[in-house]
Image (tube, helix red, strand yellow):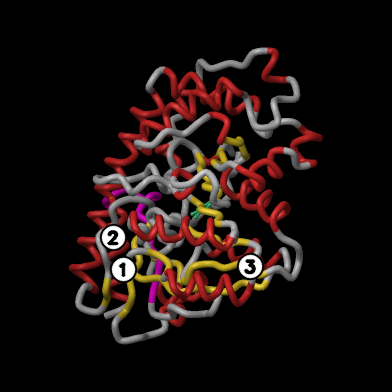
Amino acid sequence: MATQVTRPDYLIDLAVGQPEPDLLPVDLFRSLSVEQQNLAYGEQAGDETFRQVLSAWLSEDYEQPVNAEQLLLTNGSSNALDMICSQLSKPGATILVEDPSYFIALKLFKERGFNVVALPMDEDGVELQALEQAIQKYKPAFFYTIPSFHNPSGITQSYSRRQGIVKLAAQTRCPVVADDVYQSLYFGQKPPAPLACYDDNAPVLSVGSFSKILAPGLRLGWIQGSGDIFHRLKNSALLQSGGGLAPVTSALVEPLIVNGEFQKNLEYLRQIYAARSEVLLDGLVSTIGDQISIKKPNGGYFLWASFVDGRDVAAKLDEARQAGVSYLPGKICSANGQFPSSMRLCFAWYPQQQLMTASERLGLVFS
Ligand SMILES: Cc1ncc(COP(=O)(O)O)c(C=O)c1O
């Protein structure tokens, strides 16, 4: 069976945003099976036993209590975002995003006919004053944010910035949709807890996924929330008609959480990715370090390198591909076409040796 993307052998494509196929723990799944009840239409929010198991694991990982009642299972974060768009907005609505942001979320918002407004970030996340002004000006359907190990910038919102965002959501009633696919992929210090953990009365949804912490082919994720918008999602026609979205997959993953295999595998992934991120960072520093600004990542999948001379990295992409290396130009990640001098580089897909080769090739292209 083919996967979503295939790449020629000569190319080290750091524009990917996926785990290396060899890191997918197929052996964990070989002995698993499902019960008859898992083949029925499932509970709308997802199987309750699974939600309890998941909420216990999340409570430990977040160091904050998460209740099974606050969880709604989805087919991953992309599906959750699509469901949220259906429930919270109409064509022509304004959506606030960070600049830069996850380029496929930007595509999703455009496909739905939304007006996308990009807000500046600093090293603690979105700038609060800009967010407050934009909420007043545009009356947006929601603000989309990636709080931890941001795709593509790698920024993690500080605790006080998170408090500020949740407070604004509570005051203005502007919903916040936090895409937290990298929350649990920390290499050292944990990020502060997801935005949905701070105030049950604020209209905040945090979206999680097993894609980066177990396997994307599971198509399994969750929305954490409470209140009116969470209730609307749970009672959507989609779930009333089809029942819960993942009865079979959640039944497969449940024993892996209970027996600790999931946690063991996740700790292994954190170590592998941390080592790969260091190799790529060191490689880039030694080849093009004098030309770029770049920060050590503390989690997630990406390095964000910005050329200080303001050059347009997209113009070099063909040459780079001919040299056997690729990257995601920053402009693609901006609703405003900003960040022409930045590139997103993924360290999750390739083993260390290839990451070193990729840095050397980038060194040749940009020398
Ligand atoms: C910020 C962000 N959101 C969502 C996704 C997709 O997640 P899922 O596989 O759970 O749909 C990705 C994957 O690259 C991502 O980086």
Residue 213 is situated, as x and y percent measured from the top left of the image, at 43, 39
**Quick check: 138 left or right of 304?**
right
Tag 1, which secondary structure?
Answer: helix
Amino acid marked by disc 2: Thr
**Quick check: 246 left or right of 338?**
right
The local crowd at label 2, few if under 14, some if 14 to 19, many if 20 or more residues have their Cα within 10 Å, is some
Q: Say which residue label 2 marks.
A: 357
Mark drawn on residue 361: 1
Which image quarter: residue 47? top right
- Whether residue 165 appears in magenta in the rendering, the answer is no
Which image quarter: residue 285? bottom left
Amino acid marked by disc 1: Arg
Tag 3, which secondary structure?
Answer: loop
Q: Say which residue label 3 marks.
A: 140
Give the vertical position of 69 relative to 251 (above or below): below
The local crowd at label 1, few if under 14, some if 14 to 19, many if 20 or more residues have their Cα within 10 Å, is many
Residue 185 is situated, as x and y percent measured from the top left of the image, at 36, 44
The answer, for residue 97, to whether it is visible in the render is yes
The residue stretch that appears in magenta: 342-353
Amino acid marked by disc 3: Pro
**Residue at mark 1 to residue at mark 3: CA–CA distance:** 43 Å
